[in-house]
Image (cartoon, rainbow, N blue to C red):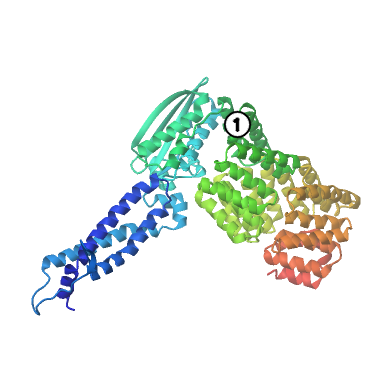
Amino acid sequence: MKLNQLINELRSRGVYQVAAIYSAGAWALLQVADIIFPILGLPDWSVSAVLVIAAAGFPVAIIVSWFFDMTPQGLVEAPVSSSEPGRPIASASHIIQLALIAVLTFLVGYLYLERLSDTPEEKANPLAAASTGRLSIAVMPFVNMSNVQDRDYIGDGLAEEILNLLAKLNELNVAARTSSFYFKDKTADIRSIGEQLGVSHVLEGSVRFDGEQVRVTAQLIEAANGYHLWSETYDRPMGSILALQDEIAGKVVTNLQLLLSPESREVLSHPTDVDPASVDYYLQGRAYLRMPPDASSLELARDFFEKATDIDPEFADAYAGLCNSMLGLYSIDLDIEKFHEAEKACQRALLLDRRAAAVYTALGNLYRVSGQYEQAIDEFNTAISLGSNSADAYLGLGLAYKGSNRATLAEESFMKAINLQPNYWLAYMSMGNFLFDAGRLEEAIPYYQRITELMPQSEIAFNNLGAAHFVSGNFAGAAQYWQQSLELAPSSDAYSNVATSLYLEGRYDEAAELYHKAVEFAPDDSEMWGNLGDTYRQLPDGADLASAMYTNAIPLAEKRLQINPSDSRTLALMGHYQAMIGEREKALDYIDKALALAPKGIAVHYYAATALAELGEWERSLDMLEQALSLGYPVSVANADANLKALRAMPRYIELTANPS
């Protein structure tokens, strides 16, 4: 069939009229769906589903129009056109009509097919989504304009509450807190902030105190040109600070001209009714909780959260903060009572508010610390679903995956946290520790170094620099950095780290002195007592003292296992302690349990090696050491550890440490 004949046949059968009507109808339907579906609370994929259905129906409509005509009597078979040979059938106007239909069909597909190509990562990542044109915002910390410097937490807290509220809106991408708060006290213009955070708008403000009154100024700025879209000043009593956050968030939505779904409108209309004094204590507690987790800052956070809950027993967020504070304190000194207090606070928070992402993050941490990894994963995923900007939820999820030996998922979760909050020191710490524990020491060092850039005067930075030198065998360099960390913030870990470097240098008297100081800070930490046992074994006439130290460590480790029976590291250490006091069968039993739980655990294999060496199980000890070294345990540490000195003259040990891979 010639082209003219084909075009005439298409026209006579009404094919391209149907194509035109169908394309226009599909266009109109998709436009309506794009506007109405979000208002009805339908998910993004529902519009894509309409597109798929419309696309699938297009060829069906064309085929039907070729074979049938719609008449008053219904569908009838379309007549076949006839024409005299040589007669021009299709005019130029017909060809133009056909071309226009093709162009219209192409535009419908092109403009909406883009929706189907969006990956889940682009939808989840606020910075990636911002680049696609969706409205996005960074909420900067509100500057304290008063002379009262110790009330910075008010402005920080107000900004964070506004950020958290806006982050719950599906129609808006919000830069994570640590990303935007990175610019606090830094000189950077709005355009630069917008470019670095990948946002189209910035909300900034200030607070000024006058007795019990507070003046808050907020302004919404378009990042591309620095123009103010909205600005307002509020004079309010301190007690209405949480209500003010709702008002400012509402103004942001109005001035961005966001069309909200019913769920998002419910978020903004959720009433806030908390005692003003409780709010003040809560904001102070949260300010301390976001600091590096040393005992002093965590105790202050706990005290403020307790004051907040004493004043307002219905304040769910304060209970969530109390839960995290107690878990932090438990992780430092392993006092089991602190864990039980955290448990009570988490359950209370959940009872009061089942919609808050922070509550589920705290509950996830509780399950993770107790070794209930599957439950922890469920809680962290719930927190993420409620607030996808939560790097803390991803960090908890990563630790839960790590605890359940799912290394790939753990690493992915840590990377998501870093991508969400690229200036969050804890995200780099978690990733560095993961790589360190996996034996990927060279990969871990850049993450530790990044912390020194983010927090150059923090004890955490020096602690990690010490770790980097430690794994390379430079124990003296490690001791130097760890000593700086110790001077900044004395803690059980800081004393223990310096003591360990001294122990590996053979300076046992000095190591014992510092291990004792570590015990003073954390008397319930079994590892501190075990370290003392290892050290006294190397001192003249220290055997009895060593036995007493191990005997102290064992019941404390048992208490730790009551909280988390899946703690493979503690099980392996129990094997080590039992071997050192001559309890052969118990030692072997603990080692087998630890290996079953963590077949690729570096520390598990290493402590199994030290225990088996003490029991005279030479070959099996060397097997465990070989596995630990193959997983990445530092040869320099093995060569310096007095617990393995019985193996050092053996040919297999010499071969293993010469070629650890």
Seen at 45% across and 36% down, the residue is: 268
Q: Nearer the viewer, residue 207 or 385?
A: 385
Compared to residue 652, the image places residue 326 above or below, namely above
Q: Position of residue 346 (x, y in %)?
A: 64, 40
Question: Which residue is most to the top?
Answer: 211
Residue 410 is drawn in which quadrant?
bottom right
User: Which of the pair 467/55 is nearer the observer?
Assistant: 55
Quick one: SS at disc 1? loop
How many numbered marks does the figure carry? 1
Q: Left or right: 251 with respect to 208?
A: left
Residue 313 showing in the rendered view: yes
Tell which residue pokes out farthest to the front in this image.
Answer: 73
Location of the C terminus by quadrant is: bottom right
Using a 10 Å C-alpha cutoff, classify the residue at mark 1 as few (fewer than 14 neighbours), some (14 to 19) or many (20 or more).
Answer: some
Q: Which residue is mark 1?
A: 314
Q: From the viewer's perspective, is residue 373 above or below residue 189? A: below
Classify the position of the N terminus by image quarter.
bottom left
- The residue that appears at 52% across and 20% down in the rendered structure is 212
Which amino acid, by three-letter code, is at mark 1?
Glu
In the rendered view, tell whether residue 575 sits above or below residue 279: below
**Image coords of residue 134 (percent x, y):** 38, 48
**Residue 298, placed above or below residue 423:** above
The residue depicted at 17 percent of the width and 71 percent of the height is 7
Left or right: residue 159 compared with residue 91: right
Residue 380 position, x and y percent, is 58, 49
Residue 494: where, in percent of width, then height? 71, 45
Res 451 seen here: no
